[in-house]
Image: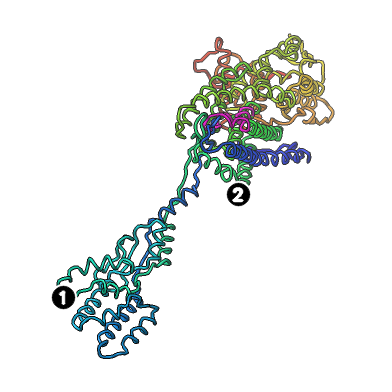
Amino acid sequence: MKKKNLISEDRKTRPVSRNVLIYALIVLTMLCALIVPLALSSESSDALNAFSRKYQVGELADEDVIARKSISFVDDQATQAKVAAATHDVLPYFAFSMNKTLGNLKRIDGFIALVEKIDDDPTVPVQIASLLTADGLVDSDSVVTQLAALSYDERTKMLRLLRESSREILSVGLYSNEELNKISAQGYGSFFLENTVDLEPFRTPRTVKVAMALTGGGLDRVMLRWLSNYDDSFSNFQPELLTQALRLLSTPNVEYDELTTMQRREAVADSVNPVTVTVSKGTYILQKDTVVTAQALKILQYLDTNSMQYTFLEQLGRLFFVVICTICALVVFKNYLPNTKRQDQYLVLLLVATLICGIASYIVVRFSRNLVVPTLDPYLPVLIAPIFIAMVTGRKRLGLVAAFLVAAYATLLPDSNSMTFFYIMVEAGCCIYFIKFVSRRLDMVYQWFFSSLSCAFVTVVSNLLLGYSFDGIWLLVVGSIINVSGSFIVVSVLLPVVEVLLNLPTAFRLHELAYADSPVLTRLSQVAQGTYNHSRVVADLSYAAAQTIGANALLARVGGLYHDIGKADHPEYFIENQNGDNKHNELKPSLSAAIIKSHVKLGMEKGRDAGLPQEVLDIIGEHHGNDVILYFYNEAKQEAAASDRDVEVNKEDFSYNGTPPSSPEAAIVMLSDCVEAATRTIKRPTAMKYQKLIHQIIMGKIDRHQLDGSRLSLTDLEDITVSFVRTLVGRDHQRIEYPDENAGEQGQSVPSPGN
């Protein structure tokens, strides 16, 4: 039989106010997920700002400050210092000036040419003075007069030496004192020289020390040493005169190229990698009773001004993240829920529980910042929602959906890390897994113990994955245990309150209804012992069958126990309570059918008075569906046929007024009720007889469309059949014969009226 997802009328026509409430809670939950991280970020920034203002370099810290997240930032001061050092390593750039070199050569050659004619032309001194004046030079040492006083041969030799010396000096390079003093004042003892004029003795760039650079004032020292080899070459050699002539005629031909120097320094500055400061999560920024360093203060200042601020794009991304995660969680949550009238209630509980977790997380993080731990993940109170939802709904999958939602929101907190989402999911999964131990409230102690143990182990593993030291691991383990303990305490307090307010069929509530003393069942056992025993067998059959197909076994048991409580008012009209006398022999079939049908309505009323959950009331109202009471229907048709009057028997008068089962549990109780009543009529029962009878009952229900809305598949029905046979064989094992028997020997009678 194909499963069908039917939409209940309650969901179709639910009030607008309920829709408004749900949408308002969704928006409020998403706003909480966005606002809490912002508030914590602002408070974190204020706290770090207080630290950065409180301490000065060299003081002793009176508290521990630990990095809550891994950060990496560029140290501007250190980067600037590195750039300054790199640019300072670029030496000043000097280059030969071709114009000045050629100007020097032209001036010297012209001077020599004029001096060579000084004996023949009396205007030579005037011409020389004009030559010098054109370049702003003044013969303060009377070089021309001294050269004119020499003999022709001596003058010729001096002029030849002057030409050679000038070329040698210009090839080495003559510098300006002002420029050399300028770079010396900048701290440079050397400079970079490039030979842009192809004069010997070098062709490739080289580094020159400032002390070795030749200036006009240093010509005396250099020339005296260089010309010492010529002292014996000719008589009346005057090196001082030659030096004076060179000083007069030579001007600096090497210039400081400041533009090229700046360009080279800028290129080096651009190639310098910024100084990056990396602080791993869990690292101490300040430690109590230790000296506050400049680096620590710098980290605090950076965190204050940068790390806790969110840009517009970051906020937009967070908004999209929250919306997508919320929608996905709600869609999956509703898809996991069957066709139940409590879908909206469970959805509201999920949103409220998530909202509580968000507010509680803000409080915990707000007042736990002084804890000396590398992460606050074990302290986040986000386990409340998954545990609560799993217990309230009785479905672990829904608890995992709640875990996904709170874990996604927790990743937005300022102190979260790459493992936060997975850590919360694993923690919640461990706690939800151990819910299988819960059948009584006392059993939560076992769940708490195993959950605490597993969460402590998960905390240690997470600590290893994140690479934190084990110095403070005990604080994280204790925090996880406290978190689990607090979550179970909160759930233990909230669960009974919600049970009462919404009358929910939680595992605790169903267990109490199934095994605790109930006034309704006590009265049923007193006034209708047969019905009471029948109900207990139906409960056992339903419980085992529901377990087989994965339905809510406790709900099926409770439904089986309470499905016939309406028979307590008129027990004598139901055959299981009769001792020979059948009250229906004195009644018309239509009246008998009316009495039989009434036990469903009376059962609903008694169930409401007893405060049974709606799910149990649905089973009571649906355990006969709108099926026909065949015994009295057939009897009425026989009476009509035997009478002389043409009387039409209305089938609806002999049909139950309920609706077919809308849940697997209600369908199982319906089948268990029919099977238990029918199998009591089998003589010499065997497993084969049971199986054939159960198959006939199920096929009859299918033919009369009683299982269309039950969401049971053919595979489920096969498993239910096997479960029924197993339970019945176990009940009657002392009197069942198992040898091969004739398949045609049924030995069964028509089901008794009233069942």
The residue at which mark 1 appears reads as 234
Q: Please provide percent x and percent y for residue 722.
A: 55, 24
Residue 422 shows in the view: no
Element assignment for label 1: loop
* Residue sticking out furthest to the front: 149
Residue occupying the point 43% across, 63% down: 262
Which three-letter amino acid code belongs to the residue tagged 1?
Answer: Phe
Which structural element holds mark 2?
A: loop
Q: Nearer the viewer, residue 505 or 753?
A: 505
From the top left corner, tell me how far across and down residue 17 is, in percent: 78, 39
Which percent across, then down, holds residue 18? 76, 38
- Residue indicated by mark 2: 311
Left or right of residue 518: residue 162: left
Residue 384 in magenta stretch: yes
Q: Residues within 10 Å of mark 1 (few under 14, many from 20)?
A: few
- Quarter in which the N terminus is drawn: top right
Chain-order first, disc 1 or disc 2? 1
Q: In the rendered view, does 154 fall on the left or right side of 247?
A: left
- Relative to 116, does residue 371 appear above or below in the rendering? above
Q: Residue furthest right?
A: 645
Image quadrant holding the C terminus, namely top right
Extent of the magenta region = 364-388
- Taking the image as shown, residue 141 lies to the left or right of residue 37, namely left
Q: CA distance from mark 1 to mark 2?
A: 87 Å
Q: Amino acid at mark 2?
A: Thr
Q: Residue 493 got which mark?
A: none
Circle 2 residues within 10 Å: few <14, some 14–19, many ≥20: few
